[in-house]
Amino acid sequence: MRRLLLASLLMTSAWPAFAQTVDADGAKALADTLAKYFGRTAIEGKIVNVAPEGDSYRVTLSTAELLKAIPGGGGYMEGDFGNYALLARPLADGTWNMSAATLPAGSIKMTTPTGPEALQWSFENAALSGVFDPKLGTFSKSDFSYDSFKMTSTSAVQDIEASAGPAKGHTTGMANPAGGVDVSNTQTASNFVESILMKSPPAPASDDGAAATAPEPAAPEQPLKAVVRSGDVSFSADAKGARNLEILDLWAFFVAHSDVKTLTDPQQAELKGKLLAALPLWEKLAGSYRFGGLDIDTPLGKFTAKTIAQEMDFDGISKDGGYHFALRTNGLTYPALPIPDWGLPFLPTDVELAFGAESIDLDTLVKAAVADMDLRRDEPFSDAFQSNAAAAFVTNPPKVVIDKSTVRTAESEITVEGEVSFAGMKPTSRTTWEMAGFDAALDRLNKAAEHEPEVKNYVVFAKLAKDFGTQLPNGHIQWIVDQQADGSVSVNGNAVKGPDPVATPDDDDALDGTMLDDNIIDPDAGSDSDNADAPKQ
């Protein structure tokens, strides 16, 4: 999927919003439009080329010419990416029908400090098609597919082979009534296999380039191999109110001024206007990556999972933004592991971790940064702005949120959710823990302690936890843990830790240094009178 990037660069640029006769003049007009986003040198150097072909324009990205344009000729890298080409046919309503009949194979060779590296990839029967709408700055609809994909990568430290297929993807886009564009993208692939061979790193080179002399190891380390297999892989992303056109306009500004060393006042004002116009980037952005039927062969044996998924849910730049992330694994199984039999039922079968941050005011910060920014200064942002931003963070810090998270075993389940605030940079929190199957876990520990005395320590802790817990009608045990700004902690209203001691200048902890906030000592700091005449940094 990642190898679609170069073609995507062509397909997501803004295109002329008018239908026209397909001829040389139309090709020049289209090339002029693309120059806004790729640069005039990309057109003149034939990195991007436009030519009429039947009722369409063939737009070609030449990776060979792109490599030539890299400063220094790309001496550290050589490769053959092939030419990425698509046909663009203007439609009567101002949209463009876009299609590509193939994605070329490619290869890269690089020289790195650890040695040579190489990468090769290929697609079989790949195809892309869609309708690009200039009024949206994206596709109103598009599809891609391929029968198979292969990739190999070699280096001094690891070798990778990966394959997948068949695969397909679909994208839709439409105007959001409140502004911006709503874009939805889904991708699926089957029969994913990735083999990873981890090798011993090469000996470091000496100053003269020869391998450094080192004691001979008792035996060479054997490479470690892991193989990941998944019956199906899926990806989804949804953006609400994405500022596509404004972001493309901002990108065009950077391309147009890429050779300018110092922006003039009008140019800086224009840049600030475009930065503000692109806010909030999007209203909502959500995405997920999921592996189904996952097997991982390792030197320890085979690990499996029914599903492993990553999820994200981000607000745009706003005054009260929330940003959440989750990792979910279900149906975990394990090979024979070097742990006692009594510990096997404690291995998790499902793990769902979800967390995030809320009450984040990026809107005020970003707008203040844009207003203060001056690219002609050595430091684009003033000391006053940086101080004010730090003070605002201390005054109104974000809130860390633990969304409902779960760890499930064969016999029990524990969940937790809550939040942590940092008013005055002192944490206060409330988390709610619940456990099902507590008695079964305690019984297992008691039986294990009959044969392994050290387990008795776990039994004592478990009984103490049960005493602090509250029995719920459903049989679960619940613990509500509160931490106050003074450091005190209570469980279900019962104090388990008192407030932190408040240090005073007469305390022994003050020593001879300066007492800072939160009982932090800076023994190297002198007295105020010692530093009064010191030069400011």
Image (tube, rainbow, N blue to C red):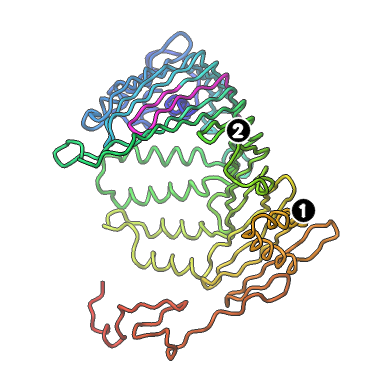
Q: What residue sits right under mark 2 in the picture?
A: 291
Left of 422 or right of it: where is 13? left
Residue at screen point 49% across, 31% down: 226
In the rendered structure, which amino acid carries the disc numbered 1? Ala
In the rendered structure, which amino acid carries the disc numbered 2? Phe
Left of 127 or right of it: where is 440? right
Q: Position of residue 465 (x, y in %)?
A: 70, 65
Left of 5 or right of it: where is 35? left
Q: CA distance from mark 1 to mark 2?
A: 32 Å
Q: Dot 1 lies on which element?
A: helix
Residue 511: quadrant of the picture: bottom left
Q: Position of residue 252 (x, y in %)?
A: 39, 37
Q: Is residue 283 above or below residue 86?
A: below
Instruction: Classify the position of the C terminus by image quarter.
Output: bottom left
Q: Position of residue 319 (x, y in %)?
A: 56, 58
Residue range in magenta is: 151-173
Residue projecting furthest to the right: 473
Q: What residue sits right under mark 1 in the picture?
A: 440
Q: Is residue 274 magenta?
A: no
Q: Dot 2 lies on which element?
A: strand
